[in-house]
């Protein structure tokens, strides 16, 4: 899955180039934190954590190898209302991001003749981590009562205050690591390619904008992030 530095870079790109009104976002802090929410209870990025939730529940996907989360299903269940909060919109953005990065990964490895499997997944994740470390990011959510309340009310499952704090601390470490030194873009990766990351980053940026614009206009963006076998 894209690491949190990749998710952060996408959020920062959105905020740098469009107004909150254009994006249909009211609270930047809630939206930013929402972009980390689906990973909090998976149990890898955030430690310690009060409990775990199965990946298939947090991401609406089979966790094997390179899954493509069903972002459309999440939207239908939790984000389709006119009063959807920005935390939920951020979680939806996270799933859209994961969906398209992994979809393009699966297409890429099929094109070059690499079989899915655990070794392929490990190489893929190493490449995502390497790419993520090349990104210039600075955003860390602010812990305040509004964030704590929104997390407690998160419709899919409540997020405990201690886990909110642990997640923010994890993001602080990620931002610090990215800022510790400038890393030049990798000329080669274990599995993917510089062109893959350039093209997919641009595509996901466009998908996020399109989805948020449609939502802001009261439309239905569930044609985005839907599993291939459900697409018409």
Image (cartoon, rainbow, N blue to C red):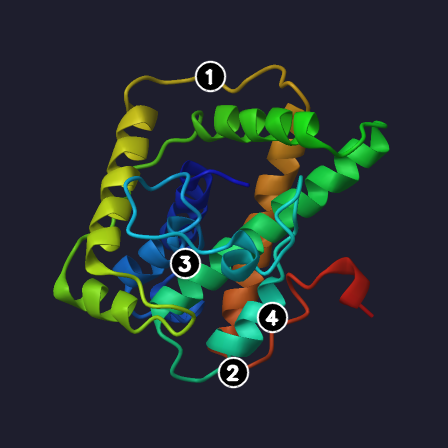
The first of marks 4 and 2 along the sequence is 4
Q: Earlier in the sequence, mark 2 or mark 3?
A: 3
Name the residue rendered at 50%, 67% in the picture: 212
| Residue behind mark 3 | 18
Query: Which dot marks residue 184?
Result: 1
**Quadrant in the rendering for residue 148:** bottom left
Q: Residue tagged by mark 4?
A: 73
Quadrant assignment, res 178: top left
Mark in the foreground, 2 or 3: 2
In the image: residue 55, left or right of residue 167: right
Whole-number angstrom distance, CA of label 1 to CA of label 4? 37 Å
Which of label 1 and label 4 is nearer to you? 4
The earlier-in-sequence mark between 3 and 1 is: 3
Q: Is residue 192 visible?
A: no
Q: Residue at x 62, y 19 (%)?
A: 189
> Disc 2 designates what residue?
218
Question: x%, y% of residue 230?
Answer: 77, 67
């Amino acid at each position: 899955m894209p690491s949190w530095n990749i998710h952060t870079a996408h959020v920062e790109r959105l905020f740098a180039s469009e107004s909150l009104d254009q994006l249909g976002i009211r609270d930047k802090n809630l939206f930013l934190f929402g972009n980390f929410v689906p990973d909090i209870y998976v149990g890898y990025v955030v430690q310690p954590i009060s409990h775990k939730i199965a990946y298939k529940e947090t991401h609406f996907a089979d966790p094997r190898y390179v899954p493509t989360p069903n972002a459309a299903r999440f939207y239908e269940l939790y984000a389709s209302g006119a009063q959807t909060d920005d935390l939920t919109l951020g979680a939806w953005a996270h799933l859209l991001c994961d969906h398209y990065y992994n979809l393009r990964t699966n297409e890429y490895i099929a094109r070059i003749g690499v079989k899915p499997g655990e070794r392929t997944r490990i190489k893929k994740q190493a490449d995502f981590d390497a790419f993520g470390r090349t990104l210039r990011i600075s955003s860390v959510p602010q812990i305040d009562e509004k964030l704590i309340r929104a997390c407690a009310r998160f419709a899919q499952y409540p997020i405990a205050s201690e886990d909110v704090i642990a997640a923010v601390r994890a993001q602080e470490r990620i931002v610090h690591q990215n800022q510790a030194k400038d890393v030049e873009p990798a000329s080669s990766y274990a599995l993917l390619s510089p062109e893959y990351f350039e093209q997919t980053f641009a595509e996901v940026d466009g998908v996020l904008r399109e989805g948020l614009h449609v939502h802001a206009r009261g439309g239905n963006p569930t044609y985005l992030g839907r599993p291939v076998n459900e697409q018409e």
